[in-house]
Amino acid sequence: MISKKDWIDKLDDKTLDFLLNNQTALDEMPENLKIKLKYMTKRFDHESEKAQRKTLVFQFVFSFTIIIILLIGLLIGRNTFLYHRFYSMCKVIKIDGKAYKIVKGKKYLLHQDDIIKEKTSVYTENDSQIQLEIDKKSRLELNQLSEIKINRLKKNKKIINNSFYLKKGMIKVRLAKLIKGSLFKITTTELIINVIGTEFEVNKSIDETTITVIEGKIWIKPNLDQSIQKELLKKNLYSQINKIINEKVVLTKDQSIIINSSDVKKFDIMLKETILFIKNIDFSNQNDPDTQKKIMAELDKKLFQLKKSYQALIIPLSHDKDENNKQVSNSNTEKTIDQRIESTHNNEEEGKKEVIIRKLPFNPQLQLDEKETSLAIDNNNIYITSDSNKSLTAVDIKSGKLLWKFTHHLISKLTSPALIYQKNLIISTSNHVFIISKQGKLLKLLNINDGPVYWAKPEIHNDSLLIPANDILYILKGNSLEKTNNIFNTSGQLYITKAKPNILYFYNINSKKLAMYNLNKNIVTHQSTPLKHRAFMKPVFANNYIFIADSIENIYRFDTTFNDQNSITLKLPAGVVSEIIYHKPFCYFIGNDGVFYKLNSNSFDLPQFIIQVDKNPDSNNYLVKKPVLFENSIYYCSDKGKLFSYDLKTTETRFLKIPGNQSNNPLICTPLKLGNVLYFIDLNSNIYTLSIH
């Protein structure tokens, strides 16, 4: 039998509910049981009320949290809307290698689709590039070892106000056309660049800025000392100076400019001196008219010199003129322009290297041609092959003094460079091979048919000299001559490249095909499909690829066996006749448009425009004028009368001033290196050396 206590303890909700709702049952219960039930009922009501309060509190907290989340969402949405309304969106769209952003002194690795805000610096590591997109319309491409600070990304509807500071390296800008009232500005230590809507490149090295306009137009002015600019705000006092330095200088398509920081500092000093002179003029003293007249004449002289120096500082390198471009190009500014482009002694920050260019004391007095001149060199002499002179000339390597000149009645046209082979000089023409001593004496004359043209260069292989000709290869061994069978069975000049031991790569200009050739077996082992257009260069074997470019608009990449599935053809802005230089992982070349290009050999996508190096490009010149790799830089003889250099490590570009070439005679031929010295020549046969210390 269940006790009273057990019965009460085991009383369930259903029975309790019955008892509480049945008065007869309650009346029949003992008094103490009735009291207990009432106590339990009261406790039950208390627990129910407590649970209900907890539920209400939970519902309130939950509802409040939802409201807060909605408010935060609305606030974020509103702020995002307002941000996009008043700020330009800068987004990472592509990264090759590694790039970082610096925010408040902290460095963060960047990834594709990252958003970059103002007051942020972006920099790239070696062999790395990054592309930024602004408002889905404009693009900034930052090259390797470059750094830019995004100072301002303001926007009001469609009117933008963007400002950037390029600390170092190179940036290429493709900017959509801006509406009236918009401002897009890039500043370096030397220059302030304002853009309307264009495509251009800015290259910032240690001490100079180079700008090249690809499309559209930009206007520029020097970045002058801030203290000077504050002083010049007193417009009435310095109205004439402001008129000089605020003159709108416009660069248009294919124009470029190089401004050196030392030249800007020199102009700052001249400007300060002129300002000080004006401040010391007592304009209230009218008692001595003669003195006042002298002072004003002196002021006019200073203002004239200031204007002349300013125009020389910002004159474009290109001779192309736009009707809106207020550039000065008279001969009076030539010397100043030379001074601002480059100093002869160039100190570089890293390693404090000094680049020294010297002119040899003597001139051999040759009338040379840009199209058909080449150089050869040994420890004692420089040898100049010149078709315009129908001669091979030797000059002393130290002095430039003429030693001897070799001519022959059978030399009707020189179309192949002289080469040093077994202590002698070899000249190959269409019908003969001349073996000449280093004293200028003819040692032997060999007859050939359809010899080399288009300045196809012979190659030394073991003890033999390989001379490319009309679809055959002549092999000179000592004084005897052999020849191979036809390579492609198609008439056409061959270009050759040595690859692996006893493996050559040929190209035939008429069949437009490449072939792998085994010298031991004297057979073609693999052959490519034809190029789209004729090429006039030897193939480049590098990184298990074969590279070649045609003379119209394409560059090609093949695997070593010319498998069609692995071949790629890339369209270029211009054809290429000058040689391709490979330096992992990039291909470098001068286009027939006179532009120096860079192309990633792995991705093999859009080539990068570096800078315009020739003002009057001619594809015929590029048969003999090619870039050369020397001391981790690429050098090229520009027709601007300067030696172009591109540092492969820092990506800095320079146009080095040539001492003794004040009239800027075009530099011709391919520079030649001997030890730690580079030799080159100008159109008037002046010979120069470049050395790095």
Image: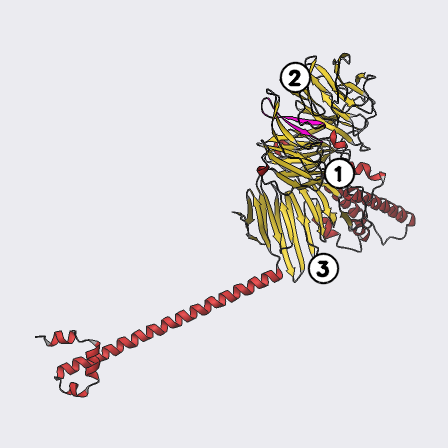
Q: Is residue 326 left or right of residue 670?
A: right
Q: Which mark is residue 181?
A: 3
User: Disc 1 or 2, which lies upstream in sequence?
Assistant: 1
Q: Is residue 14 above or below residue 281?
A: below
Q: Which residues are magenta?
A: 490-511
Q: Residues within 10 Å of mark 2 (few under 14, many from 20)?
A: some
Residue hosting label 2: 464
What amino acid does circle 2 point to?
Ser
Q: Nearer the viewer, mark 1 or mark 2?
A: 2
Q: Is residue 679 above or below residue 267?
A: above
x then y, percent, for residue 143:
62, 42
User: Pointer 3: residues within 10 angstroms few (<14), some, or many (20+)?
Assistant: few
Classify residue 596 as left or right of residue 363: left
Q: Where the C terminus falls, by quadrant?
A: top right
Q: Position of residue 339 (x, y in %)?
A: 77, 36
Using the numbered discs, state the Cα–Cα distance from disc 1 to disc 3 in whole angstroms: 33 Å
- In this rendering, would 361 be left or right of 138? right
Mark 1 is surrounded, within 10 Å at the Cα level, by few (under 14), some (14 to 19) or many (20 or more) other residues, namely many
Residue under label 1: 340
- Which x, y percent locates residue 535? 70, 33
Q: Quadrant of residue 236?
A: bottom right
Q: Residue at x 76, y 47 (%)?
A: 251
Secondary structure state at the residue bearing disc 1: helix
Label 1 vs 3, first from the N-terminus: 3
Q: Label 1 vs label 2: CA separation?
A: 49 Å
